[in-house]
Image (cartoon, coloured by chain):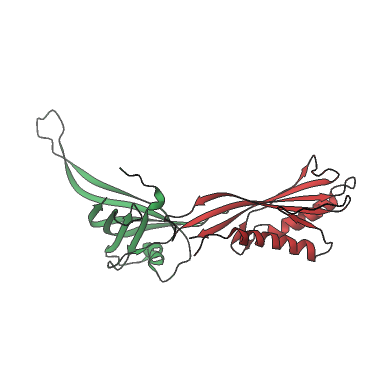
Amino acid sequence: MAAIDLNTVRSTIEGRINLELQSDSPKIPVVFNNVSYTPQLGDSWVQCLINFGDNEYMSMGGTTDSDNLVVGVVLFNIYTSTGIGSKDNFVIGKRIRDLYNRINVSGVYFDPPVGPEVVSSSSPTGYFQTQVRVTFESFEEL
Amino acid sequence: MAFYRGQQGSVKFDDAGSSAAAITATRSWSMTVEKAVLDSTALGAIHAGNVGGIISGSGSVELLYTASSGDETNVFIEAANMGSDAGDAIFELYLDTTGTKKISFDGLITSADYSATVGEAEVITCNFVTNGTITLDI
């Protein structure tokens, strides 16, 4: 086997959210790591941030015939209009939650999502913001 | 002086007792070599006397379930459920990746614990005892 390709994991995660929010109605813009985006006030949009975190030993061995566990987290910031309640925001949150809840896609195992949790001070300001966090694991077979 | 870490270890096994093959996805192994103690205290002695008796070994190997088939790993995890075990399987427990520091012996798998826990990799623990000579090349 081979060392894990982080961009394969990234594209698996990003491709899934992009397909969901761009192909199904209503379409909602998705912004990924290190992509510039100027939101239109009043529009709903989602920011998807992927972070790779801990790596753990899974089995004995050196640089070959051994296994590691790569752990990461996907953070979704969901932005909707202010002053209209939380319904619209939670509808998007449910779509995202259902998209990753306990699934295994291309060897990436997603845990039960956390949230959507309300963020008291939206960043950028002028939105009602919630967060959905999904930790994930992938086995690296060297 | 040298130090070693657990990931440098490995386990090899062959149920046919000829050529040991690596057990895949091994997480850990442990082994206890035990010597029976015989009381040799003479009548009237003030202090107890002891001499060494029979030496035996036992231990366990923990590995991840990988659905392997047709190899020694598959035989290893199913060995506890096989009858007519002559105890002539080869075990080799390695302490380093160079493959020169090992404990080897003939033995048999006496029990296996299969477990699945939500959110974790599935693990199998096989327990063994030795049969005959234990060779320490450590």
Name which quarter of the figure residue B133 lies in. bottom left
> Eyeballing the image, is B123 above or below B32?
below
The reply, left or right, for residue B74 in relation to residue A134 is: left
User: x%, y% of residue A110?
Assistant: 63, 56
Judge by depth and name the residue closer to the eye, A82 or A99: A82
> Is residue B120 in view from this perspective?
no
Which residue is located at x 63 percent, y 54 percent?
Answer: A111
Residue farthest toward the top in the current orientation of the protein? B46
Residue B51 horizontal/vertical position (percent)? 15, 41
Residue at 70% from the left image edge and 62% from the top image edge: A16
On the image, the x and y values in percent for residue A45 come to: 81, 54
Q: Name the one closer to the observer, A30 or B126.
A: A30
Q: Does residue B132 appear in this view?
A: yes
Among the chains pictured, the one given green colouring is B
Q: Which chain is red?
A: A
Q: x, y (%) of residue B110? A: 34, 58
B59 and B41: which is toward the camera = B59
